[in-house]
Image (cartoon, grey):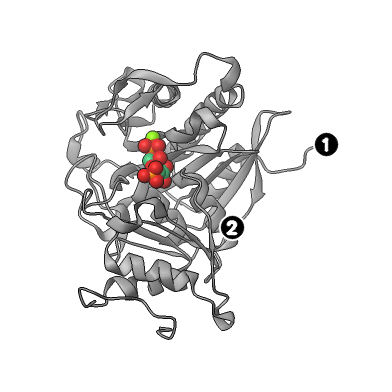
């Protein structure tokens, strides 16, 4: 007998925390859970389905869209459309926002921003991928929702979460009262509470960054990487380098084990690569709710002004002490020909 608390039961239980709740957010989270199960079913047998490889077109990011990007996008949008609690979707895969004005969602008050498939470069090679979602309450009065309803600061999120399609499939989310993780039990087709009240360790020994771009990184990032690699028993260095290349998977590991994930700006990408609205903001809300820290090297990600739908941002996210340390390097003034030396322990 499975005596786990299912996601549905947990959401209903937690609804009591919100005295004025009418169940709309609960139903919206339920709809996201349903789409996640459908996408999980395809991911799990992707090799057998005609769902690997490129979809043959380029998305607004200038990236080649994968078939699974398109499939996941369609599944989440249709679940949100038929669920009736969402009035607008913003997706990584769509250039503009998608108003949901079906009859059922006329009075819907929630906006969902989504990265339907995160880690697209890993789809074909059976490495964990994910889905990231962020939920806002609309701010515009009645009638069709507006772009401004999506361009709210990360601090205005009412909920955020991710699904990781890995050796097991998990859904991790927050509504601003801590972070809880649910594992999908395929035998009953339910997400079950497996990781209650997740907390990220205050410090860690894992750093996660694509060092292949090292020469293009700002001096502060280069120096922090060198700092991580220096022998220093007292501070458990050298740290371990881990980089999966799926942001959801790299963050999930660090959330559990402690660590820092960095995707900085580079000369070619002065705002970095990752998108503020549907990658950085939702994952920063989760990490902060788990006791961690998330900045763009100086400013809290959740406080960053959102001006455009696909706006990018550098991100330093993870265990608080590690992010603070990385920031101290970012804010240090370096001589042009600066060389990091072993004795310079900070
Ligand atoms: O290959 P790079 O430049 O290291 O980028 C990897 C990063 O890009 C992403 O794949 C971007 O997300 P999408 O796959 O959703 O476009 C992140 O998941 C990952 O952290
Ligand atoms: Mg992504
Ligand atoms: Mg994506």
The image quadrant that residue 308 belongs to is top left
**Residue 24 position by quadrant:** top left
Q: Earlier in the sequence, mark 1 or mark 2?
A: 1
User: Percent position (x, y) of residue 151?
Assistant: 22, 44
- Residue shown at 43%/86% (left/top)? 343
Screen quadrant of the N terminus: top right
Find the residue positioned furthest to the top.
50
Query: Mark 2 = which residue?
Result: 256
Is residue 133 depicted above or below 337 in this figure?
A: above
Residue at mark 1: 1
- Figure quadrant of the C terminus: bottom left
* Res. 133 in view: no
Most foreground residue, 326 or 175? 326
Judged by depth in the image, the label closer to the viewer, 1 or 2, is: 2
Q: Is residue 204 left or right of residue 105?
A: right
Q: Nearer the viewer, residue 278 or 146?
A: 278
Q: Identify the residue at image location x=47%, y=70%.
A: 228
Location of residue 85 with respect to 337 vertically, above or below: above
> x and y percent of residue 7 in the render?
60, 40
Mark-to-mark CA distance, 1 and 2: 28 Å
Q: Residues within 10 Å of mark 1 (few under 14, many from 20)?
A: few
Mark 1 residue CB less than 8 A from any atom of ligand 1: no
Q: Which residue occupies the foreground of this view, 344 or 302?
A: 344
Q: Is residue 102 left or right of residue 10?
A: left
The residue located at (27%, 77%) in the rendering is: 332
Q: Position of residue 93 (x, y in %)?
A: 32, 29
Q: Position of residue 29 (x, y in %)?
A: 48, 37
**Label 1 residue SS:** loop
Neighbourhood count class around disc 2 (C-alpha, 10 Å): few under 14, some 14–19, many 20 upward: some
């Amino acid at each position: 007998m499975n005596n786990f608390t299912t996601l549905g039961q947990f959401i209903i239980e937690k609804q009591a925390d919100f005295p004025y709740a009418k169940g709309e957010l609960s139903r919206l989270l339920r709809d996201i859970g349903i789409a996640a199960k459908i996408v999980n079913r395809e991911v799990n047998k992707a090799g057998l389905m005609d769902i690997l490889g490129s979809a043959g077109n380029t998305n607004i990011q200038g990236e080649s869209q994968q078939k699974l990007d398109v499939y996941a996008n369609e599944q989440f949008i249709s679940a949100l459309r038929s669920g009736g609690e969402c009035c607008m979707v913003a997706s990584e895969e769509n250039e503009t926002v998608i108003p949901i004005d079906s009859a059922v969602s006329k009075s819907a008050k929630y906006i969902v921003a989504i990265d339907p498939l995160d880690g697209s470069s890993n789809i074909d090679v059976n490495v964990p991928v994910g889905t990231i979602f962020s939920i806002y309450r609309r701010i515009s009065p009645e009638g069709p929702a507006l772009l401004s309803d999506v361009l709210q600061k990360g601090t205005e999120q009412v909920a955020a979460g991710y699904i990781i399609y890995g050796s097991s499939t998990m859904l991790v989310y927050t509504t601003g009262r801590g972070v809880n993780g649910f594992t999908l039990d395929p035998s009953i087709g339910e997400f079950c509470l497996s990781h209650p009240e997740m907390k990220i360790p205050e410090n860690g020994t894992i750093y996660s960054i694509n060092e292949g771009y090292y020469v293009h990184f700002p001096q502060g990032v280069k120096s922090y990487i060198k700092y991580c690699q220096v022998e220093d028993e007292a501070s458990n260095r050298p740290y371990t380098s881990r980089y999966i290349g799926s942001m959801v998977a790299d963050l999930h590991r660090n959330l559990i084990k402690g660590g820092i994930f960095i995707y900085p700006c580079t000369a070619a990408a002065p705002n970095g690569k990752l998108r503020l609205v549907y990658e950085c903001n939702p994952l920063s809300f989760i990490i902060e709710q788990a006791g961690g820290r998330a900045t763009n090297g100086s400013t809290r990600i959740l406080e960053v002004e959102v001006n455009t739908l696909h706006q990018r941002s550098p991100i330093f996210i993870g265990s608080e002490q590690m992010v603070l340390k990385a920031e101290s390097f970012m804010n240090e003034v370096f001589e042009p020909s600066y060389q990091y030396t072993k004795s310079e322990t900070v």
